[in-house]
Amino acid sequence: MTILGIETSCDETGAAVLSTSNNRLTLLANSLSSSIALHSTTGGIIPEVAAREQLRYIIPVIREALKKGLSYDLGSPKPPPLDAIAVTYGPGLIGSLLVGVETAKTLSLVWNKELIPINHLYGHIYANWLQHHTIYLPAIALVISGGHTDLVYLRQHNDITVIGGTRDDAAGEAFDKIGRLLNLPYPAGPAISHLAEKGNTHAFDLPRPMIRSHDFDFSFSGLKTAVLNLVKKNKWEFHDPKFVSNNKQILYDLCASVQQAIIDVVVIKTLKAAKKYRVRSILLGGGVAANKKLKEDLQMAVKENLQKTDLFIPPKEFCTDNGAMIAAAAVFTPFRSSWKSLSVDPELYY
Ligand code: KG4
Ligand code: ZN
């Protein structure tokens, strides 16, 4: 089976070509265009701007993926040698989602190909199968991104239960909002992670919200408020370049302390879930899964506490949004749609 995967839920335009045989996935092409630099100038994503950028890049990105993966020229009179087109239909920004879904529907109609609707969150989970052919279930997945911090129990493929989620801000959102307080460019996760390398994780005593709660939920808005209060109390002027250049260590230490507070909570809860559900695998997915310290701490914690459980973490390029993860999820779903009936669902959950 050969699948074209299309991802346009937010600010990344992704298209990938993936072939499978016996559930072994081979990625033939993975093209991506990001409008993130543009959103950096406004300190966050303006949905209308993101949608317009999706419209600009969707055709070039699909053209590139088909050329690289199948040596196929878009515009050729014959359809490409594909079996299906998979597309993210939610959750995400409505305008961005519409660009991918309407394009996929059009291609499905003109090329007469199967249309596979994919939940973006499943894409983050199935990104793990792009690198590993053998992942034993049951598994616990931690989907940790700009919009989600979810613990998900995969009993089998297509038998998925959410066991916990964030009650307010997602982990990525916390990184991004705290980054704004520190005058770091959007999205702030990568910047905080980078600055934290020079900092002391114990420099500031920040809260670990809900770390000991008896459920698998998360809450990160209190952490953001704690950082805001700390900045105000100490009159730190992170918007003043002179202050920053004279107080670099404060910034490094604050970044290290914030990052550690988020990591401590998600590591403890992921381990607790893996123990309770006696899983064979732990899967990480989502943009924040690109965080180096999170990967190190989780690897260490699993090694020390769960010797019989394997931990899977996608490579960085498959943690953040991409078309390959959408094609990968399509391999495992029985759902099909028609170009006539598929519509976007910005609020889609699991
Ligand atoms: O999965 P993703 O690309 O988009 C969503 O579906 O949300 O995740 C984006 C999020 C942003 O909040 C960004 O700050 C965060 O992932 N992120 C990171 C890192 N790289 C991206 N957070 C912490 N450390 C990183 N290295
Ligand atoms: Zn995502």
Image: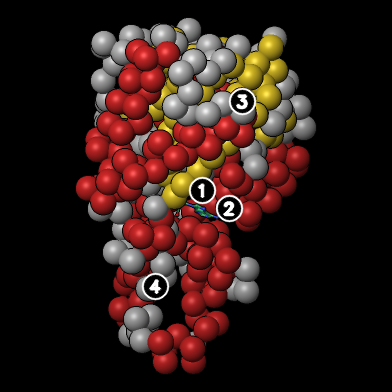
Task: Kindly report the distance in space between the C-alpha atoms of the residues bearing marks 3 and 2.
Answer: 33 Å
Mark 1 CB lies closer than 8 A to ligand 1: yes
Amino acid under label 3?
Answer: Leu
Label 2's element?
Answer: loop
Residue contact between numbered discs 4 and 1, judged by CB atoms under 8 Å: no
What residue appears at the point 76 percent right and 27 percent down from the top-left corner?
308
What residue appears at the point 48 percent right and 23 percent down from the top-left corner?
76
Camera-near label (3 vs 4) is 3
Front in this rendered view, residue 131 or 242: 131
Residue contact between numbered discs 2 and 4, judged by CB atoms under 8 Å: no
What residue appears at the point 30 percent right and 78 percent down from the top-left corner?
232
In the rendered structure, find residue 70 and report the number of the disc placed on it. Answer: 3
Q: Which residue is mark 2?
A: 291
Mark 3 CB lies closer than 8 A to ligand 2: no
| Res. 225 image quadrant | bottom left
In the rendered structure, find residue 288 and report the number of the disc placed on it. Answer: 1
Q: Which residue is mark 4?
A: 182
Task: Kindly report the distance in space between the C-alpha atoms of the residues bearing marks 1 and 3.
Answer: 32 Å
> In x, y percent, where is residue 126?
56, 26
Mark 2 CB lies closer than 8 A to ligand 1: yes
Q: Earlier in the sequence, mark 3 or mark 4?
A: 3
Amino acid under label 1?
Answer: Val
